[in-house]
């Protein structure tokens, strides 16, 4: 898993298992300890397999280490919000890059196989 794959995985993970509202305090968007551990393991995997740290992946990993070392609810709420914001910023940039690109014209598998759209015919 490289850094880009990690960021896409993390976005999907947040969509499938969003941070929960704590039952006792009714504070929204706090990562559970289990969720934080899962994300940290994947961040470590991306850093190890890529061979070089990414600013975003390293920031998330370091932030989660601090998150797991402190039980203070206010601190965890703040950290969860910062992680949410970092993910949103990353994908806002990706979305903007994709909308700035001109559309590409690609041929379907059938067109490539039959040669449709070109002077070359296989059938």
Image (cartoon, rainbow, N blue to C red):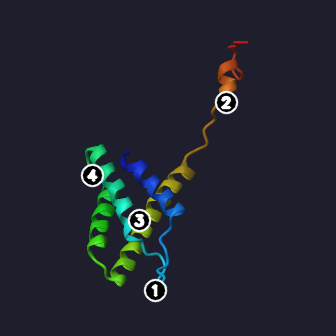
Q: Secondary structure at mark 1?
A: loop
- Residue at horizontal 46 percent and vertical 86 percent from the top: 24
Quadrant (top left, top right, bottom left, bottom right) of the N terminus:
top left
**Percent position of residue 69, x then y:** 26, 73
As measured in the structure, the alpha-carbon distance from the residue carrying label 3 to the one carrying label 4 is 22 Å
Spatial CA distance of label 2 from label 4 is 38 Å
Q: Which residue is mark 2?
A: 108
Helix, strand or loop at mark 2? loop
118 or 60: nearer the viewer:
60
Q: Which mark is residue 35?
A: 3
Query: Which of disc 2 and disc 1 is earlier in sequence?
Result: 1
Q: Residue 108 at x, y = what percent?
A: 67, 30
Q: Nearer the viewer, mark 3 or mark 2?
A: 3
Give the alpha-carbon distance from disc 1 to disc 2, as whole Å: 54 Å
Label 2: few (<14), some (14–19) or many (≥20) C-alpha neighbours in 10 Å: few
Q: Quadrant of residue 79?
A: bottom left
Mark 4 or mark 1, earlier in chain = 1
What residue is pinned by disc 4? 53
Position of residue 47 relative to residue 67, above or below, is: above
Q: Nearer the viewer, mark 1 or mark 2?
A: 1
Residue contact at pointers 1 and 2, CB within 8 angstroms? no
Residue that numbered label 1 is attached to: 24
Disc 3 to disc 1, how far (Cα)? Answer: 18 Å
Viewer-side label of 4, 1 = 1
Residue depicted at 70% across the width and 13% down the height: 121
Residue 75 sits in quarter: bottom left
User: Local crowd at mark 3 within 10 Å, few (<14), some, or many (≥20)?
Assistant: some
Residue 115 vs 53, above or below: the answer is above
Q: Residues within 10 Å of mark 1 (few under 14, many from 20)?
A: few
Front one among 87 and 71 = 71
| Residue at 35%, 63% in the rendered image | 37
């Amino acid at each position: 898993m490289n850094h880009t794959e990690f960021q896409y995985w993390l976005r999907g993970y947040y969509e499938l298992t969003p941070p929960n509202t704590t039952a006792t305090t009714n504070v929204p968007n706090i990562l559970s300890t289990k969720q934080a551990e899962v994300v940290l393991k994947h961040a470590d995997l991306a850093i190890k397999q890529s061979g070089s740290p990414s600013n975003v992946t390293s920031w998330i990993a370091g932030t989660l280490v601090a998150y797991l070392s402190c039980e203070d609810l206010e601190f965890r709420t703040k950290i969860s919000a910062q992680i949410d914001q970092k993910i949103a910023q990353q994908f806002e940039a990706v979305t903007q890059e994709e909308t700035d690109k001109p559309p590409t014209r690609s041929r379907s598998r059938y067109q490539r196989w039959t040669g449709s759209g070109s002077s070359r015919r296989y059938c």
